[in-house]
Image: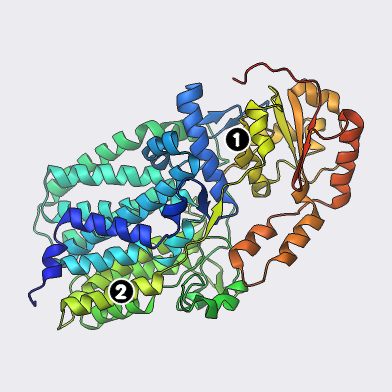
Amino acid sequence: MEDSRIERFLERRAVVLALFAFLSVLLTLPLAFRFTSALPYGSGDVWQNYWNLWWWKKALFDLHVHPYHTNLLFYPHGADLIFHTHSPFNMLATMPVNWYFGLAAAYNASVLLALTLSGYGGWKLGREITGDARAGFLSGLIFAFFPQHLEQTLEHINLFSTQFLPWALYYLVRLVRQGGLRPALGLGITFGLNALCSWHLGIKLAATCLVVAAAVWSSSRRPAGKVFRELLLAAFTAALVVGPFVAPLIVEIGEGARYYQKPPADRGIDPAYLLTPHFGQPLWGGLVTGRYIDRAYQASGFICYLGFVPLALAALAVARRRRGVLLWGGLALGSLIFALGSPMWWNGRLLEGLWLPFDLLRHAPGLSVLRVANRFLILTSLALGVLAAIGWTSLRKRSDGRFLLVGGLILLEYAWLPFPMQKVDFAPSYQQMLDGPLLRIGAVLDIPFHQRNRTVHNMAAQTVHGRPIAAGYLSTFPPDDDAFIANDPALSDLADVPKLERPIDFRRLIQLGFDTIILHKYRADSYGKKAVAAVPRDHLLERKEALRLGGVPDEKLAEVRRQLEEHAGAAAFEDDRIAIFYLRAGTRSPVR
């Protein structure tokens, strides 16, 4: 190998960590400049995760209760959050940021932390496999800034927090190759932290570890007994890390709970887009925007662009049959096949009658929870990064200039600039409900409510006014909560799209503890249609947000308003999006 200053430079862990931190800030601009006042431009689950950050801080420091149950949602029944998506690692790791700088800063800190540590972990794993620090850095670039990974930051804190996947595999490879206490403890800790980012990632990593451990051990001379004992130590360590968080889930499942098992979803990636650059690329993204308008799923996580430079390096590794290609190529291809789902999509069309391996997961004990196939692309990106690193080492000329060119091209292919952001902006009346002239002490009934993800903004508003609300948008809905609403005529008649089969039972609502009703005018169909019409068709993220508006016939909301005004008089506050009504005279007692 040619003498390389960059190679020696990239052997320093602090330097590599600092470089990935810098690139994470650079490739998410203007996030760093709007750190406390804006969020990535998601329209649904980003607000659920925003609420999660608020709830964990409130539960632990204000109410001193376990965050796996709340009385602030599905009021007055309350809600078990045992199977709700929490991402405990992010909730706790960003708590200091949350405390001093607020919820938006905590979410954004999770983004930068995940990107930085994903890159650093990818470097560790790639360098371990190849023995080349520059190859490891390329591996880290591919894994950290993979387009699907960047797209997930817009919505899913549990799915963009992939940073401990390469770390765990790095320690696993070292354990099988060399053994020792440090790799065993490192594997256990990082495996546990990965699971605390997402239980889905924990299951995927467990399956991947079995494959990698078997492949690496087949070429290792270490006795199987020693390897097995060290793996047991790693497993014990991981159990200690996740135990306090997973124990309630195990108890609940043991008592017969099954509501965490959701029905299958036909949500695999569309392979026709594997070579279609993503629409956020600053130079040529606009050329492919029209293609993404018509893709089957507009939800975050379905961009599946692999990148031509990473694929070229991976192909070079395969062509030259470098060591490790069989393992990492097999992992890349296998996870990509699972990511296709079943049935498969092609160019926006569902291909019925085609059997694919993802079908096996639907009947495998414990694996049916991996219901969204596109998430397997996370493993594809990790394996692709390692393959590209192997491909780099197979180049006959590996000059620093060529390394900078290759790395720069990867970043150019994957860049999403400017990174899409949205201002965190709530109606002033929400704050006044907490500490101003609109202060009340009862619960809030949002109309509409219990409309699944279409009413996630009710939870986001709760982070400001702090009052209990009816229902909420959870990852899984405990059947008792649904039953409580369904069995109460006053609530069931107003849930989802209000049925209004009878006059609103204000007496019953007051009896349940509701003293404030917020009428969400932007849920009217006419409002939603106007919002969609005002957004250019090629503004994909803004259009996706506008499509979440509406959902309730205008005449339904008009009738609710008529009855509210008849009962409570004029709205206490109103703007173009909401109107707030009081059901009874409030007191000015402090909110607890």
Q: Tell which of 504 and 170 is nearer to you.
A: 504
Q: Residues within 10 Å of mark 1 (few under 14, many from 20)?
A: some
Left or right: 212 in relation to 43:
left
Name the residue carrying label 2. 408
Q: Is residue 434 visible?
A: yes
Helix, strand, or loop for circle 1?
Answer: helix
* In front of the other: 259 or 316: 316
Q: CA distance from mark 1 to mark 2?
A: 43 Å
The earlier-in-sequence mark between 1 and 2 is 2
Residue 191 lies, in percent from the top left, at 30, 46
Residue 437 position in % (x across, y down): 71, 26
Position of residue 114 in the picture relative to residue 406 (left or right): right
Q: Which residue is mark 1?
A: 464
Dot 2, crowdedness within 10 Å: few (<14), some or many (≥20)? some
What residue is shown at x 72% (from left), y 65% (from top)? Answer: 534
Residue at point 9% right, 54% down?
222
On the image, the x and y values in percent for residue 29 come to 43, 60
Q: Kindly indicate the quadrant of the structure image that contains residue 435.
A: top right
* Rendered residue at 74%/66% (across/down): 533
Label number found at residue 195 = none
Looking at the rendered structure, the kind of residue marked 1 is Val
Residue 458 in picture, x, y percent from top left? 66, 41
Q: Could you tell me which secondary element the residue under label 2 belongs to?
A: helix
Q: Is 143 drawn above or below residue 354 in the view shown? A: above
The amino acid pointed to by label 2 is: Gly
Is 366 located above or below residue 307 in the figure? above
The reply to whether residue 580 is in sight is no
Q: Residue at x 68, y 59 (%)?
A: 546
In the displayed structure, 33 sits above or below 562; it is below
Q: Are marks 1 and 2 in contact (CB under 8 Å)?
A: no
